[in-house]
């Protein structure tokens, strides 16, 4: 099957979820009490808003991920072509690339970007 | 021609006999979609049953054994119960995002399944960038979890979702890099080429040392990707209630549950396909007779045996290792797995360059 499979599975997944949710809405009981729609916190009343501040470290991790993810995208064509090129050049080039990348990772680790304290 | 190829060709011919070419194409697409949805649901139910039986096996108890023979219908009963439950959320939730989240998870895992070959020529969507497509599509699932956690308006959900975001994007690097290590040996991203390259030896034997390291890294980071127990901080019951899906109930909760198990299936299927030869039978060197007997077992059976083995391994992990803390989790990925992975790629590249593989 060609590229139309993407659209097919998009529609199939949508119909699957939508149909099941709709069916459940039709047959499930409705029973409203005021407490029912409070945020679940072990029965204790919630203090303050639930959209709370969170640790900025998550943001740092996302930034680091972005760098390395782009790097994987660069690596993919290299990995596919590597076996078909009969010379030392791709290996040496990737060595240089990894040294630069490793320095970046080392910098991030030395700056305690990963440490959680 | 393999059995599965003959089967798809027969279905194709049958449809062409009944409809005009255009209508036959649409009918084929609808059939494929329905087949994959059915497989999706059945695999999910079967995996939940397996998980409970294996958990019981490890804890020396019986597990579900009342509904149907050997309790096989237990998960069907559970699914029916979940459909009939009233959906309860929070009043202040972002209702649009809240109901959008299951779509992301289900569609992304459905698409990821579509590229995996379960037999010769037996995948819905065999594209030339298969492995890349799989990495890309399965990372969309993170969005679903983040949206669910944010949209729920619950502190537990928010913390669970953020943890899951950090965890899944971190370990995605290791999944991608360990798959790339094997791509070096194959030289193609198409899944059918990856399997075809293993007709003589499976890739884990072909690439010996670096391939084995890549396999171990893939299993560890795959377990983390699918949020399973040594890495299940996302829904650490003792800390966060049910984590990012605390506020979901009924059928919407069922979708989160289903996608979790399907993700485990995807990770296992990819490990089986890329490292253990996919639907290729097990051969030993020149043992003609033995290899011939192995050839009689059809491809899909091999595929599901290998996938089942990895699934069993992941369930075994669950009852063996205690849960990690979030800082340990991040340290493991960024300080150990990622540098090891980069070195491993260099090692593999060196071996491929020198021709030191089987």
Image: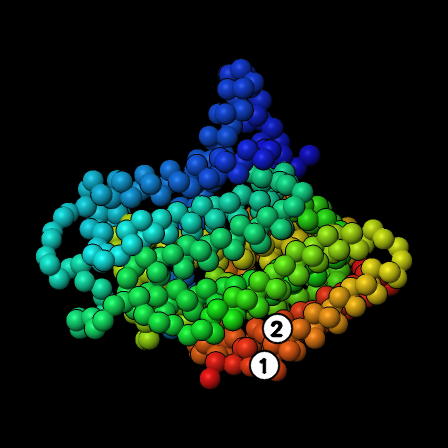
Q: CA distance from mark 1 to mark 2?
A: 19 Å
Location of the C terminus of chain B by quadrant is: bottom right
Q: Do pointers 1 and 2 mark residues of a single chain?
A: no
| Residue A37 visible in the displayed image | yes
Residue B320's disc is: none
Q: Nearer the viewer, residue A111 or B160?
A: A111
Residue B337's disc is: 2
Residue B245, compared with residue B236, is above or below; it is above
Q: Nearer the viewer, mark 1 or mark 2?
A: 1
Identity of the residue furthest to the right in this view? A87
Instruction: Report the side of B305 relative to B320 (left or right).
Output: right
Which residue is located at x 45 percent, y 43 percent?
A: B39
| Residue B73 visible in the displayed image | no
Residue B346, compared with residue B322, is above or below; it is above
On the image, the x and y values in percent for residue B124 come to: 56, 38
Instruction: Report the side of B258 relative to B202 (left or right).
Output: left
Instruction: Report the side of B259 relative to A51 (left or right).
Output: right
Which residue is located at x 47 percent, y 70 percent?
A: A58
Location of the N terminus of chain B by quadrant is: top right
**Mark 1 surroundings: few (<14), some (14-19) or many (≥20) residues within 10 A:** few
Which residue is located at x 38 percent, y 72 percent?
A: A54
Q: How is the image coloured?
A: rainbow
Q: Nearer the viewer, residue A53 or B240?
A: A53
Residue B26, compared with residue B223, is above or below; it is above
On the image, the x and y values in percent for residue B330 come to: 52, 75
Q: What residue is disc 1 on?
A: A111
On the image, the x and y values in percent for residue B273 come to: 62, 53
């Amino acid at each position: 099957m060609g590229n139309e499979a993407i659209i097919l599975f998009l529609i199939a997944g949508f119909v699957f979820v939508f149909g099941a949710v709709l069916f459940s809405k039709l047959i499930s009981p409705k029973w409203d009490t005021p407490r029912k729609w409070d945020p679940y916190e072990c029965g204790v009343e919630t203090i303050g808003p639930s959209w709370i501040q969170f640790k900025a470290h998550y943001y740092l991790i996302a930034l680091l991920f972005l760098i390395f993810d782009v790097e994987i995208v660069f690596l993919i064509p290299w990995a596919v072509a590597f076996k078909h090129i009969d010379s030392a050049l791709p290996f040496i080039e990737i060595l240089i690339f990894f040294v630069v990348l490793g320095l970046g990772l080392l910098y991030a680790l030395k700056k305690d970007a990963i440490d959680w304290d | 021609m393999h059995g599965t190829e003959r089967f798809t060709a027969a279905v194709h011919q049958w449809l062409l006999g009944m409809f005009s070419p255009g209508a036959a194409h649409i009918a084929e697409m609808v059939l494929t979609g329905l087949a994959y949805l059915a497989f999706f649901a059945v695999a999910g139910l079967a995996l939940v049953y397996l998980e409970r039986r294996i958990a019981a096996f490890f804890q020396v108890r019986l597990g579900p054994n009342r509904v149907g023979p050997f309790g096989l219908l237990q998960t069907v009963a559970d699914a029916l119960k979940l459909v009939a439950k009233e959906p309860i959320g929070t009043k202040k939730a972002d209702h649009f995002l809240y109901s959008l989240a299951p779509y992301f998870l289900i569609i992304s895992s459905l698409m990821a399944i579509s590229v995996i070959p379960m037999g010769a020529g037996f995948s819905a969507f065999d594209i030339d960038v298969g492995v890349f497509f799989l990495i890309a599509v399965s990372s969309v699932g993170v969005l679903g979890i983040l949206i669910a956690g944010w949209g729920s308006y619950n502190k537990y959900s928010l913390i669970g979702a953020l943890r899951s975001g950090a965890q899944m994007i971190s370990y995605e690097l290791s999944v991608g890099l360990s798959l790339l290590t094997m791509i070096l040996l194959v030289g193609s991203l198409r899944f059918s080429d990856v399997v075809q390259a293993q007709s003589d030896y499976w890739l884990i034997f072909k690439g010996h040392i670096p391939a084995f390291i890549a396999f171990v890294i893939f299993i560890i980071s795959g377990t983390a990707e699918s949020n399973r127990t040594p890495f299940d901080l996302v829904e650490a019951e003792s800390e966060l209630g049910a984590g990012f899906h605390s506020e979901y109930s009924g059928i919407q909760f069922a979708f989160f549950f289903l996608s979790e198990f399907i993700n485990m299936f995807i990770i296992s299927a990819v490990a089986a396909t890329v490292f253990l030869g996919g639907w290729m039978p097990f051969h030993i060197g020149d043992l003609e007779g033995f290899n011939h007997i192995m050839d009689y077992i059809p491809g899909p059976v091999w595929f599901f045996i290998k996938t089942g083995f990895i699934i069993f391994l992941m369930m075994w992990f669950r009852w063996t290792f205690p849960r990690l803390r979030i800082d340990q989790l991040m340290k493991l990925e960024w300080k150990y797995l990622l540098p090891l992975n980069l070195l491993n790629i260099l090692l593999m590249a060196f071996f491929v360059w020198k021709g030191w593989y089987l």
